[in-house]
Amino acid sequence: MSSLKAGSSQDSYRHPRERMVRDLEERYGIASPSVLAAMRKVPRHLFVQQHLGAQAYSDFALPIGEEQTISQPFVVARMSEYLELDRDHSVLEIGTGSGYQTAVLAELARVIYSIERVPSLAQDAIKRVQALGHSNVKIQIFDGTVGWSQVAPFDRILVTAGAPGAPPRLLEQLKVGGRLVIPEGDQDRQRLVIYDKVSKRRIERQEGEAVAFVPLIGRAGWQPRS
Ligand code: SAM
């Protein structure tokens, strides 16, 4: 794995990454300057298998092994934008995958707790975020549908796998004033959903774009397909 940082003179992917960011802004209407800056900085080609490096800045999901995918850049940008992150925020992410979205979040918030259920993916993601110097990221391996009670509550929670609904433990672990973003639907197609915890007892729900994520597998998710 290369430890080459984005922005260095040897970064041969600087131009494709700039093009990706321009597309996010002009074609998809991503407007948050901080999200665009984070996506300009994080080297997506280091989060895909080496032979897929040339496709890393195209706007689609790519395989990362274990039947999982790194999400499409537009979806990463839109979910990051929906989170309305602040430098002081503590964020829980469910579904580390390659660690790309984790690295984008690490540019935007104080601390990122990320959970992945597949050990080999988590181990590779840990190496990548360490190589890029993200010291504000903690990754652990377990079923994220139960949340991470030891470090709760969170200002923001992001689920990056398709769920039948918002896991109750995640809503419990969200601070009042906090926001959870999750793809909800069936195992093949979902819609981004934003939950705002406006008081201890009141949660508001709004829907965003149609998306297609791999399933969230776990106690408050789907059962693994046999
Ligand atoms: N955001 C990731 C990236 O940038 O590479 C892509 C995430 S991928 C679409 C979804 C991930 O969620 C997979 O790596 C999958 O193993 C993981 N996952 C599914 N169910 C999970 C669960 N209950 N807890 C933790 N991770 C889970």
Image (tube, rainbow, N blue to C red):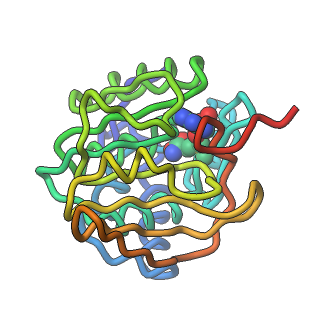
Q: Who's the residue at 29% across and 38% down the image? A: 112
Q: Is residue 48 visible?
A: no
* Residue 81, position as x, y percentages in the image: 35, 67
> Would residue 102 appear left or right of 38 to someone viewing this image?
right
* Residue 209, position as x, y percentages in the image: 57, 76
Q: What number of labels is visible?
A: 0
Q: Viewer-proximal residue, 13 or 73?
A: 73
Q: Viewer-proximal residue, 138 or 22?
A: 138
Looking at the image, which residue sits at the far front? 201
Q: Quadrant of the C terminus?
A: top right
Residue 69 against residue 18 in the figure, above or below: above
Q: Who's the residue at 69% across and 48% down the image? A: 214
Looking at the image, which residue sits at the far left? 88
* Residue 90, position as x, y percentages in the image: 21, 44
Q: Who's the residue at 75% across and 54% down the image? A: 187
* Residue 220, position as x, y percentages in the image: 58, 43
Looking at the image, which residue sits at the far right? 226
Quadrant housing residue 188: bottom right
Q: Who's the residue at 32% across and 69% down the image? A: 196
> Would residue 61 appear left or right of 139 to someone viewing this image?
right
Quadrant for ligand 1? top right
Residue 155 against residue 44 in the figure, above or below: below
Q: Is residue 208 visible?
A: yes
Residue 50 against residue 92 in the figure, above or below: above
